[in-house]
Amino acid sequence: MKLNFKNRIAYHYIVATALIVGLVFLVIFFVVKSTVYANLDKDLNFEIQKHTQEITISNDSIYFSNKEELEEREHVEVQVNPVFIQLSGTNGKLFDKSPNLKDKELATSANQKAGQHFNTILSNEPIRQVQLPIEKNDVLKGYVVAAMSLEGSTRVIRNLGNTLLLLYPLIIIGLFFISSFLAGRSIAPIRSIIATTNKITRNNLNDRVALPQKKDELHELSSAINELLNRIERTIERERQFTSDASHELRTPLASLRGNLEVLIQKERSAAEYVEKIEYSLEVIDTMSFTLDQLLTLARMDAPTNSESKDVTLLSTLVDEIVYKNKEAIQHKNLQIKLKLQTNRDYVVPRYNAHLILDNIIQNAVKYSYENGIISIVLEARKEAIICTITDNGIGIKKEDIQKIFNSFYRSNALQHKHIKGNGLGLSIAKKSADAIGAKIELESQLEGGTSFKILFKPILS
C-alpha cells in the first residue's frame, strides 16, 4: 500500500488507536455485562434467601408457609423483573411454586452446585437461575429454586454490543481524517523545506529554509539543512575562487612561456640561447607550480577540520625547521637571525597551521629584508597566549596598505619591487591558518623602517 508521508503518519496513528479503542470497548462491554449479571445475581440471592425463610417441611412435603400472602404480594407489587420461586424434591418432584410460574416449571439438578448462578431457558425465554438445598436434621429434603428473566438484561447487553460495533468504525474513520489533517499541519515545515530545496541550484544558493517557531525536531532538521547549504555554498565559493584565482595567476606566465617557446622555434638559435630560454621557461614553470600549491592550500583551508588536528610540535623546534629551510636565501642576503626564547619552558602548537603561518611570515621577512639585515624572532609565554614576534628591518609597508595586506594577491608597492618574486598569497594563507586554530596576527610596519609580525597562539602545554 503506497501512502504519502502524511497518510503514513495518520495510518500508523490509527492502527495504534484502533487497537486501544478496540481494547477499551471490549473492557466496557465485559464490565457492563458482568455488572448486569452481578446485580441480577444479587437480586436472586436476596429473593431466594427471603423465600427460604418462608418454607415449611412436613413429613416428605415441602411448601410455602403462607401461599396466600405470596399471591397477594405478586398482585400488589409492580415487578419490573418478576422472580420465579419453586420447591422441588431430591428426585425432581414439584412440591410448590410461585403463582407467576402458572403451568411452567423450573429445572432442578442434584449435580448443580448450591448457590451457583447459571443461564437456562424457560418457555423459550432466557432466565437466570440459582438453587439452594433444603435440609432438616442434616438430611437433604429438596431444593428451593429462584429464577429471573434475562430478556431485559440480554437486550441491554446486545444493544450495548451493537452500539459499540457501530461506533468503532465511525470513530476510527473520523480519527483517520482528523489525524490526517493534523499530520498535514505538522509536516507543513517539511513542505516548506521541499519547496526551498527545489529552488536551490548551483547558481542559486542564497535561499534558506524558514525555521519553524517551535524548537522541535523539525526546527533541528531545518537548521541542519541550512548549515549544510552554508557549507555547500562555501565549498562552491572556494571552487569558484580557486578557478578565478588560478585563471588570473596562470594566464600571464602561460602566455610568457608560450611566447618564449615560440621565439625558440622561429629560427635556429645558439646553444647558449636555447639554454637561456629553457632556464627561463623552467623558472616560469616553478613559479606556476608554487602558485598552484598556494592556491590549493587556500582552497583546502577548512577551519573546523584543521583546528581539530591533534598533530602538535614544539614552537621553538618549528621555528628552527623553517629557518633552516630558508637557509640558502638567508645566506644569499647575508642576513643575521636572532632567536630569543623569553620563557623557561617550551610550548606546543598545532603543527600544520602553525607551520603555514610561520613559514609564510619568515619567508616574507627574508624576501623583503635588505642585504646584511637582521631578523629577530622572539618567543615568549603569557597567561593568555604564546607569542612569536618576527621583526625585520626591510622595506616595510605603507600605512594605507596594512589593512589590505592579508587579501589574496595583494602586494604593497608591487611595481616598485618587481625584482622580488611573489604572488600575494602567503599572508592570506597565514591569516586563514591563524583563524582556523584561533590564533591572532598583529602587524606593525613603517615604510623603509621594517615590519613586525606578532602571532598569538592559544597555550597548549607540552
Image (cartoon, rainbow, N blue to C red):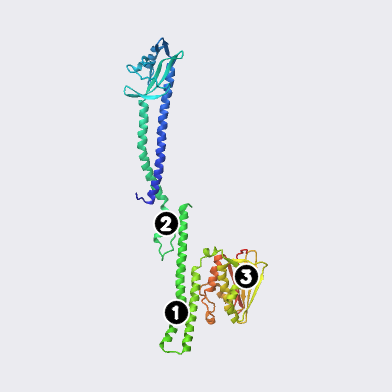
Viewer-nearest residue: 302 or 79: 302
Residue 172's place in the image compared with 111, above or below, is: below
**How far apart are the alpha carbons under marks 1 and 2?**
46 Å
Q: Secondary structure at mark 1?
A: helix
Q: Secondary structure at mark 3?
A: helix
Nearest-to-viewer mark from 1 and 2: 1
Identify the residue at horizontal 41%, vertical 86% (top origin): 265
Instruction: Give amino acid for label 3.
Output: Ser
Around disc 3, counting alpha carbons within 10 Å, would you say few (fewer than 14), some (14 to 19), or many (20 or more)?
A: some
Nearest-to-viewer mark from 3 and 2: 3
Q: Position of residue 175 (x, y in %)?
A: 38, 43
Marks 3 and 2 in Cβ contact (< 8 Å): no
First in sequence: mark 3 vs mark 2: 2
Q: Position of residue 314 (x, y in %)?
A: 61, 68
Q: Which residue is mark 1?
A: 254
Q: Which residue is mark 2?
A: 193
First in sequence: mark 1 vs mark 3: 1
User: Within the image, what quadrant is residue 229 found in?
Assistant: bottom left
Residue 332's place in the image compared with 303, above or below, is: below
Residue 403 visible in the current orientation:
yes
Instruction: Give amino acid for label 1.
Output: Leu
Viewer-nearest residue: 344 or 402: 344
- Per the rendering, the mark at residue 388 is none
Viewer-nearest residue: 319 or 205: 319
- Quadrant in the picture for the C terminus: bottom right
On the picture, is 334 further left or further right than 211?
right
